[in-house]
Every structure is written in C-alpha cells, then in structure tokens.
Amino acid sequence: MAKISACIISYNEEKKIEGCLKSLLPVADEIIIIDSLSSDNTLKIAEKYTGKIFHQKFMGHIEQKNLAVEKASHDWVISLDCDERLTEELQQSILTIKDQLDETDADAYCMARKTFYIYRWLNYCWYPDIKTRLFNKNTAHWGGTNPHDRVITDGNNIVKLKGDIQHYSFDTLSDHIQTIDKFTEIGADEIIRKNKRASIISPFTHAFWIFIKTYFIKRGFLDGFAGILVASLSCMHVFIKYSKVIIKRKQDKGINT
C-alpha cells in the first residue's frame, strides 16, 4: 500500500486546525505543517497530531505549500488548508484507491469542495468548486497566482473522487471583508509583478463578469441571501483588486490623476 503525506500551511488557526487534522488521520501516514510563526494556540494543538512542524516566515501561499511538499517523506501528497476537512465519503474514496496509487495511471486526484459561509452551506455559487489536492510530488507542484494557488501536474489525467472537502470559510461578514482587503493587496501585487495588462475599465468589466457568473450562471440566487452576499462581495473583491493595480501603477509613475 502506498503511503500518503498530508501537507498543511498554518498561521493563527487555533479555531479550525484541529478539525482539519482529525479528518486527515484515517488517510495520512504523516502530517507535515509549515507554520508562519503563529502567536496563538495553533502549534500547541498541532503538536497533538504531528511532530513534523516547521517554522517559516510567510513567503506566499504557493511558496509555503511547495515547501511543505518538499518536506514530505512520501511521494503521494494530500494538501488541505486549515479551514478544510475531508468528509467520511471522501476519506473512504481515498482509502479505496490507496492500494493502487503506486501503479495508477492517474496524474492526480481532484474532488469537490463545499463551503460553509457564515450561517449555511453554499450549494450553488461556490459549488462544486473542484480542487486537485491528492498528487504525486514528483510530477506535480503548487503554482498559479497568489493568493489563488492551484496544483499543476505534468499530465492531464486528473481523476475525480467521490466525496467533498468541507470548507469552513468565513465566520462573519467582517471576516470576509477583511480577507478581501488582504487578498486584493496580494493579488494586485501579483498582477503588477507579472506585468499583466489592466486598463481603467478593468475593475468594471472583471467585477461585472464575476457577479454574472456567480449569481446567474452558477445559480447563486438559489443560495438565498447568502448567495447575494457572496456574489456582491466577489464582485467587490475583483473591483478592488484591479483598482489597486491601477492606483499602484500611477503611484509608481508619480501620476497624481
């Protein structure tokens, strides 16, 4: 039977990390944690589940996750965020394929992610949010654009497993708004670093599209008031991100208009 390393990055996650770690115990043979110098009880809780905790000042989501993968002892890696956990159905799906991992033709495995947003599960606007989270570290790595990281594989044979990742996202509306400010700063810096194009109309066009996609195409309206919140704040997220890009570029050029 192949062995699986669970890889997690953490920072001040005392409220949610234990649920994540408990859900990994049935499928993981080791747990690797890269902690970004937490100041709460995150490490105290984590130490109950693993001795493989490494301390690293935050370098970026992609960089932290790739560092965790580098520390893994086994070829096959399952990666979760601290606010995520495996359902029993997904645990069973992983255990079912675990015997064949070393002989599989699959490049990686993906699964749906279902989000609990403030007071209810989202069944439409953020579901199914398909994520590749079980992969061979020799043929895959974390990439994408911070803070929206994703697993990139050498091949294209990604097999979907039954069961969900449960994502306990925002506890309050304030949490969501604070995260928007944080993530739009990271996202804007990445757009500038990669020299991506952004015009004066980009905040409007990108924001309009994300609202239409979330609320109508993904049928977010069926998620009730939560769907309105998610679509509206997703729209605001994109608008602010591209606005920050424009402002930062003007500031760099010394333009005061």
Image (cartoon, rainbow, N blue to C red):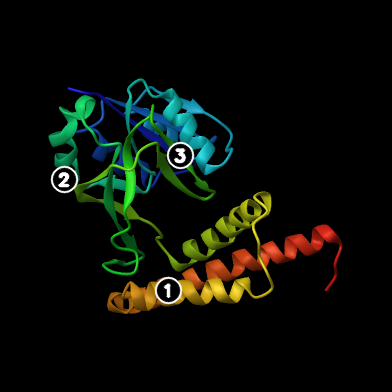
* Alpha carbons under labels 3 and 1: distance apart: 27 Å
Q: Nearer the viewer, residue 4 or 182?
A: 4
Mark sitting earlier along the chain (1/2): 2
Residue 170 placement, left or right of 221: right
Q: Marks 2 and 1: in contact by CB < 8 Å?
A: no
* Alpha carbons under labels 1 and 2: distance apart: 30 Å
Q: Nearer the viewer, residue 197 or 181?
A: 197
Disc on res. 142: 3
Image point 30% across, 78% down: which residue? 224
Residue 172 placement, left or right of 62: left
Image point 71% across, 66% down: which residue? 246
Task: Say what amino acid the circle numbered 3 marks.
Answer: Trp
Residue 225: % across, % down? 35, 78
Q: Can you tell which of label 1 and label 2 is closer to the viewer?
A: 1
Mark sitting earlier along the chain (3/1): 3
Q: Quadrant of the C terminus?
A: bottom right
Quarter holding residue 23: top left
Task: Say what amino acid the circle numbered 1 marks.
Answer: Ala
Task: Say what amino acid the circle numbered 2 marks.
Answer: Glu
Residue 216: % across, % down? 36, 78
Q: Which residue is mark 1?
A: 231
Image point 41% across, 60% down: which residue? 170
* Alpha carbons under labels 3 and 2: distance apart: 26 Å
Quarter holding residue 128: bottom left
Residue 81: % across, % down? 39, 44
Query: What secondary structure is found at the residue carrying circle 3?
Result: strand
